[in-house]
Image: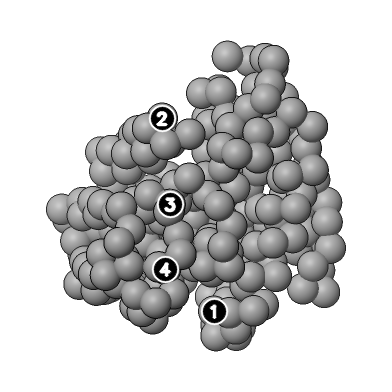
Amino acid sequence: MSITTREIIYDIDGLSMRAHLAQPNSAGPWPAVLIGHDGIGLDEYQRHRAEDLAAHGYLALAMDYHGGQLYFGRPNEMLARIMPLLADDQRMQAIGNAALDALLAVPGIDPNRLAALGYGAGGRIVLELTRTGVPFKSIAVVHPALPDAKADDWTELTSTFLLCTGSEDPLCSPEQLMKFGHALQGAGIDWRMNVYGGAKHAFWARPANGGVAHTGPTVPGVGYHPKHAERAWQAVLDLFRETI
């Protein structure tokens, strides 16, 4: 399916955000997906994921929460941006809501068929946005930064959750995801978890910059795993096909 892409600019958190919109060249209304990038920034991978989704018939917006900044090879600057953000639920919710408003303003969207996808810190933003009551039919998070596991925070939701991580991820371990999954279970949520054997943090990140995975200089325990990257993406597509 052919698609159209464009940049959407909006202001939040004292920054001018530059999100990437991809939509099918077909008659709407379309189901819609909000994408949250990982801590490095809105790079080509998340842009391509939005475009892949558009080719499957979804309208997809890859949000920006760094004001167009990419933190390749600048781990200290990235952490200075990310860590205060992850410590402030309301700030994350405001960032997520601004991106969602930009998505909902696109003509042809079906507001009754919404889903969300988040990577790393973008997964945490998606989760915080969901916790405010946004009626996502489904949420997929890949090696997310997880909130405290409290069932009471999720009892009013009817979303289906997909949690993905690598068995060797030091920043989002299977044990952490299982603890969060138990909170979802206590809240009566429909959830599933995929653990990819041997995969490290950011296992989906295709090598770039001369063959080095883009998060390589940033944190230990990072590595690209091509087979599991494809498997995780297929799991996301299966989830959205089932729910929206």
Q: Which residue is mark 2?
A: 241
Q: Earlier in the sequence, mark 4 or mark 2?
A: 4
> In the image, what residue occupies the spot 51% across and 23% down?
56
Element on which disc 3 rests: loop
Rounded to the nearest angstrom, the CA distance separating label 4 from label 1 is: 19 Å
> In the image, what residue occupies the spot 59% across and 47% down?
34
Instruction: Note whether 33 is above or below 219 in the view shown.
Output: above
Q: Are marks 4 and 1 in contact (CB under 8 Å)?
A: no
Element on which disc 1 rests: helix
Element on which disc 2 rests: helix
Q: Are marks 3 and 4 in contact (CB under 8 Å)?
A: no
Q: Are marks 3 and 2 in contact (CB under 8 Å)?
A: no
10 Å crowding of disc 3: few (<14), some (14-19), many (20+)? many
Residue 199 x/y as whole percent: 23, 55
How many discs appear? 4
Q: Earlier in the sequence, mark 1 or mark 2?
A: 1
> In the image, what residue occupies the spot 44% across and 47% down?
138
Q: Which residue is mark 1?
A: 86
In the rendered view, does 149 fall on the left or right side of 70?
left
In the rendered view, does 68 fall on the left or right side of 37?
right
Residue 229 x/y as whole percent: 33, 43
10 Å crowding of disc 2: few (<14), some (14-19), many (20+)? few
Q: Which residue is mark 4?
A: 154
Q: Which residue is mark 3?
A: 159
